[in-house]
Image (cartoon, rainbow, N blue to C red):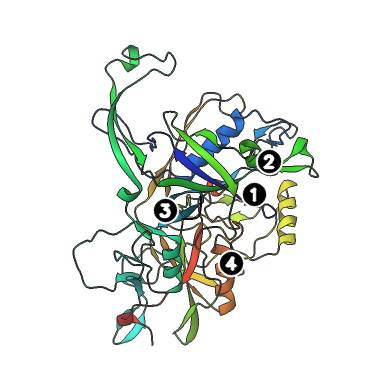
Amino acid sequence: MHPTTRPNQIILRPTDVLFFRDGRPMSGASVGHTAAWPLPDVINHALHAALHRAGLENTHAHRLGRSGEYPDPDQRVRKFGSLSTAGPFPVRVSPSGKGTDSVHTWYFARPRDANSAGNVSVTLRPLAALVHDSPTPWDQSSLPAPLKYAVVNTLPPKKEDDLEPWISTKAYQAYLSGSPSPPVSNNFCTDKHIADTEYAIGIAIDPATSTTGRDETKGKIYAAHYLRLRDDFRLGLFAEAPDKVNGDPANKRDLIKLLFNDKPRSIIVGGQQRVCTAVRTDAPIPLPLPIGLTGGFSSVHLNGRERWLVKWILLTPAIWPEIPPGTSKRGTERKPHPGGWLPNWVCPESGRVMLETIDPEKRRQRRSLNYNGKGYPSNPNIDASLVAAIVPKPIIVTGWALPNENDRTTGGAKSTHMAVPAGAVYYFEADSSQAAEALAAALNWHGNGPGDKIKNRRSTLLGEKGYGLGVCGTWNFHEHGRPK
C-alpha cells in the first residue's frame, strides 16, 4: 500500500452465486476448477474494471513498458496502474449487540505446520538428522537444494480428522506467539461453514453472435460448480489507487474513495457477470491481518555457532517464476533461478537470502536510476539462509485478456503460472539476532511497523494484486532431533 495513505477496507456481499475458474477445460462432465476461493488477481481485476466503467476524469495515465524502457515515452495510455489490493479473505459478519454495528471476523488459510483440528499448536517441525547422537545435515536424503532439514510430524500416526482450513485473526496470533488456542467457536472454519457449492449444466454461447446451437457451439454443453456464500460471510479486501490529477504531484487523490463516494456500489466479480454489493470504509488501524513477530526469535547452537530461527508463513499465494540467465535491468549479470516453490530472492545453491535492507531515501535514488535507464549493483546484507520448507501442491493462476488497441489487439489466454498456496511455511536460520530482525522486517507484510499499512509483497509476480503477503514467527527443532 502507498506509504502516505490509509488503505480502504472493502466488504463484498454477493447478490447471487459466484463463478471462479482456472484454465482447466470445462466440457461434458468436466467441471474444471470453478468453485474455489477466488484468487487475489480476480478481485483486483474486478476493481480495475469498475474504475474504467466509472468514467473518472483527469486521471493520471501511465506509459507502456517497464521502468526506463518505453517504446514511446510520450504515449500514456495505461490508466489506474497505481491500483493495489490485498485479499479477498473470508469475513464473518455478526451482530455486535450494540445498535446497528457489526463485528467482522477475518479468516486466513491455516499454516501447514499446525495440523491438529480445533487448535493451532505446531505439529510439524524440522528435524536435524542424528548419526551417533550428533546432528548432521540430511546429505543423503532426497531433499531439494538448498534445504538442510526435513520437516516431520511430531504426533503419533492417526486417521485424518476434520481439519479446519481457515482460522481467525485471533487464532493466527495465538499460533504466532505460541499461546494456547482460543475456543473453537468462530475461530476455526471449514469450507462448508463459509460457502456451499452448487452444480449446474450450461449451454455454450458464441460470444460473437450471442447465440447457441449453431456452428462451433452446436451440441456443446458444460458443467460448472458455483460458490454460494453463507448469509453471514463476505469477501473482505484492502485497496487503494493513489492518483495525481492531470499528472500534478501537488494535487493527489485516492480513486477508490472517488469510485465509491461513500455509497454502496455494485461490482462485477468473477466470470459470468456475477454481481456483488461493495461497501467501502476506512480500514481499521491496525489492519485485521495477523501481525508477525519482529523480534524475540528462538536460537540454537549449531556447529559451534548460535543461530536464530525465523519462519515465514504465506497469508496469500505467491508466484516465483523460473528466471533464465542474462542481464538484469540494472545492467548486472543475472544468474538462472528455478523459481517454482523456491522464492526468487533465495539463492538456489546456498539458500542465502538475497534481500537488502535499505532506507527510503536510497530506495528513491535507485528508482530514479531505473527510470533513467541506469543500473545499480545489488548488495544483499541479510545474513540468513533457507533451511527447510513445507510447500503444498501448487495452484494454477491464469486468465483471459480481452483485445485492446494498445498492446493486445487480438486478446487471448494469459500466461499460466503455478503459485505456492497460502499456508506454506519457510524456515530460515539467521546468523545474528539483528539479522533475524532484519529478515522479519523484509518478510512481514507490515515490515517492522505496527500493522497500519502493507509494506512488503514478496511475490515476484502480481504483488500489486495481493500475492506474496506473509508473516514471520519462530520455530524450534523436533525434540528427538534437537541439536545439542
Tag shown at residue 441: 4
Disc 1 versus disc 4: distance between alpha carbons?
A: 25 Å
Q: Earlier in the sequence, mark 2 or mark 1?
A: 2
Tag shown at residue 420: 3
Q: Earlier in the sequence, mark 1 or mark 3?
A: 1
Q: Position of residue 374 (x, y in %)?
A: 73, 50
Which residue corresponds to the image point at 37% horizontal and 35% vertical from the top-left? Answer: 17
- Residue 184: quarter of image: bottom left
Number of other residues with Cα within 10 Å of mark 4, as a class: few under 14, some 14 to 19, many 20 or more: many
In this picture, residue 470 sits left or right of residue 167: right
SS class, disc 3: loop
The residue at which mark 1 appears reads as 329
> Which of the two discs, 1 and 3, sits closer to the camera?
3
Disc 1 versus disc 3: distance between alpha carbons?
A: 26 Å
SS class, disc 1: loop
Q: Is residue 418 above or below residue 443?
A: above
Amino acid type, mark 4: Ala
